[in-house]
Image (tube, rainbow, N blue to C red):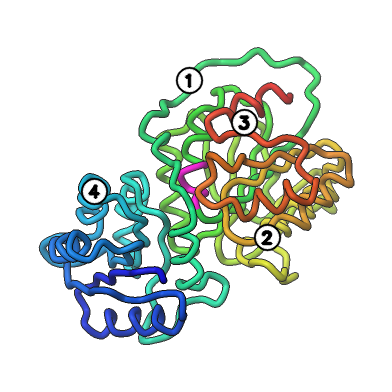
Amino acid sequence: MVKAVVIDDSGLMRILISDILRSDGRIKVVGTARNGLDGLNKVLETNPDVVITDMVMPSHDGLFLVKEVMKKQPVPVILLSSLERTNEKIFDALEAGAFEFIDKPVNGTAFSSDYPLNELVIQAVESKNNLDLRVKTRQNNNLHTFDEKLNYDIVCIGASTGGPGALEILVKRLPANFPLPIVIAQHMPERFIRSFVMRLNKIAPLKISLAKKGETPIPGNVYLAPGDSNLSLIRSRFNGLPVFSSSKRQFEEFNNPSVDCLFTSAAEVYRDRCIGVILSGMGKDGLRGASIIGEAKGLVIAQDQESSVVYGMPGVVVNNGIAEYTVGISEMASFLTGCL
């Protein structure tokens, strides 16, 4: 039985979240609290397996709680937030050791069926957090000497739970003259993605931006899929160049953005000139797309189990024999550079 502590300044929200958790026979709520300080004391008192906390609370907030819990009694912490002004603090909390974040239910509505809280709680307890590398990783402003003729034309990356921290490590370590466009589908609520782009821009030697419909991926640029649709790549009707588009097709595993959608479309456009990278994440999104990249004779790389917060997405690609290589996240940037 997984023991959970719920922390939120709203009594109604504490009841709602606790009821959601109790609906799962695997989870037992052993305590609740109304702010970060009370929550810390409750964690020390009850010794839970996981903590679910609001980010915005009077006196002591979620960031305070994460920092103190990681110092005094490390345990997976899942963050809840509904205010856009907390976005930067969310990423600070992830860097401090929080497991993952999720949107709060609004007006009593349930959590998204695509990202259920209970499964996230179970995954947090079962997984080992390996993202302490983030604070040790510095930006790579060095230049690498690349061959004039490259082996590939694009890198596509898919990630979910644990992805933000993994991506921070990866983009920091890429050389400043990395010669391919990089396109990322990260499972993340839409309102957080723009803040994540801004955060990556502060730490990466490459330009990071949101992918825009009709735009051609430019070498040396990194693009994140918006969270309001499934990003795809197509050939322009006007000049035949690859351009970003949004697909109305819905995929079984995850949508907005879908890794399968990005990978499948990239394989159709770039064929054997495409690299697909699957990073830490829950579920199977990317399995179908990675398979299609492999069938097109492109290169498929998966993050290794040791460095993945959640080995679901990379694990299923590896176990199905689709990944040609498995690589630790601290070596991923240099490995990609060497593939070119």
Residue 31 in the image, given as x and y percentages of width and height: 24, 74
Amino acid type assigned to the residue bearing label 4 in the image:
Lys
Which quarter of the rendered picture does the C terminus lie within?
top right
CB contact under 8 Å: marks 2 and 3: no
Does dot 4 land on a helix, a strand or a loop?
helix
Residue type at mark 2: give it.
Answer: Lys
Amino acid type of the residue that numbered disc 3 sits on in the rendered structure: Gly
Q: Quadrant of residue 265?
A: bottom right
Circle 3 or circle 1, nearest the eye:
1
Asked if marks 3 and 1 touch (Cβ < 8 Å), the reply is no
Residue 337 vertical position relative to residue 191 in the rendered view, above or below: above
The numbered mark, 1 or 4, whose residue comes first in the sequence reads 4
- Residue 96 lies left or right of residue 267; in this view the side is left
Q: Is residue 6 magenta?
A: no
Which is more N-terminal, label 1 or label 2?
1
Q: Does label 3 or label 4 sit earlier along the sequence? A: 4
Q: Disc 3 on helix, strand or loop?
A: loop
Gap between marks 3 and 1 measured at Cα: 13 Å
| Residue annotated with mark 4 | 67
| Residue that numbered label 1 is attached to | 141
| Side (left or right) of 121 relative to 237 | left
Q: Which residues are magenta?
A: 162-166
**SS at mark 2?**
loop
Residue 24 image point, x, y percent:
46, 80
What amino acid type is highlighted by mark number 1? Asn
Which residue is the site of mark 2? 284
